[in-house]
Image (spheres, rainbow, N blue to C red):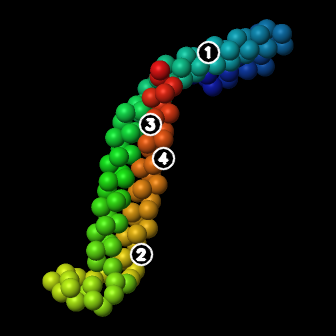
Amino acid sequence: MGIIEELERLSKLHDSGTLSDDEFAKAKARLLTQQEQRSTARASAAAPMAAAPRKSGTARIIRGIISLVVGLGIFLWAREHSPYMGLGAMLARMDSFVLQPKVYNGALIISALLGLNGLVLLVLGFQADQRKD
């Protein structure tokens, strides 16, 4: 029987005069307390599963280095195909292609974001490793 059915049953007993006001209040309080304890027990049992695993400092450092390297690679690639290079550089690279300005600027933004992400991950990783010591 659920909590709602139990409360309805208690209410009917109270309305019919079987339970006094005091008995009804005590029974209702006991029922609600039991329900709260069951809910708390279920929540505390589920809490360890719901908590996200913490990332180790080493994993953050590795991800930071990878992010920095990829960001640097994108920056160097975009710079190699810059639409803003001089005419002499364009003629020297006739076998290569030149990026559209929008693509070039997008590549620079992505490389900057990856670089910042890498630096943040490195800092967080080193901080996490220092807290362990």
Name which residue lies at 46% across and 35% down: 126
Name which residue lies at 68% across and 15% down: 33
State the separation of the CA atoms marked 1 and 4: 42 Å
State the separation of the CA atoms marked 2 and 4: 23 Å
Q: Is residue 121 above or below residue 6?
A: below
Residue at the spot of label 1: 37
Name which residue lies at 21% across and 85% down: 92
Instruction: Using a 10 Å C-alpha cutoff, classify the residue at mark 1 as few (fewer than 14 neighbours), some (14 to 19) or many (20 or more).
Output: few
Which mark, by number, is residue 125? Answer: 3
Q: Residue 75, percent across and down?
A: 35, 66
Q: Residue 86, percent across and down?
A: 33, 87
State the separation of the CA atoms marked 4 and 3: 8 Å
- Amino acid, disc 3: Gly
Residue at the spot of label 4: 120
- Amino acid, disc 4: Val
N-term-proximal mark, 4 vs 3: 4
Check whether the beta carbons of the residues at disc 3 and disc 1 lie within 8 A of each other. no
State the separation of the CA atoms marked 3 and 2: 30 Å
Q: Is residue 119 toward the left or the right of residue 17 in the image?
A: left
Give the mark toward the camera: 3 or 1: 3
Residue at the spot of label 2: 105
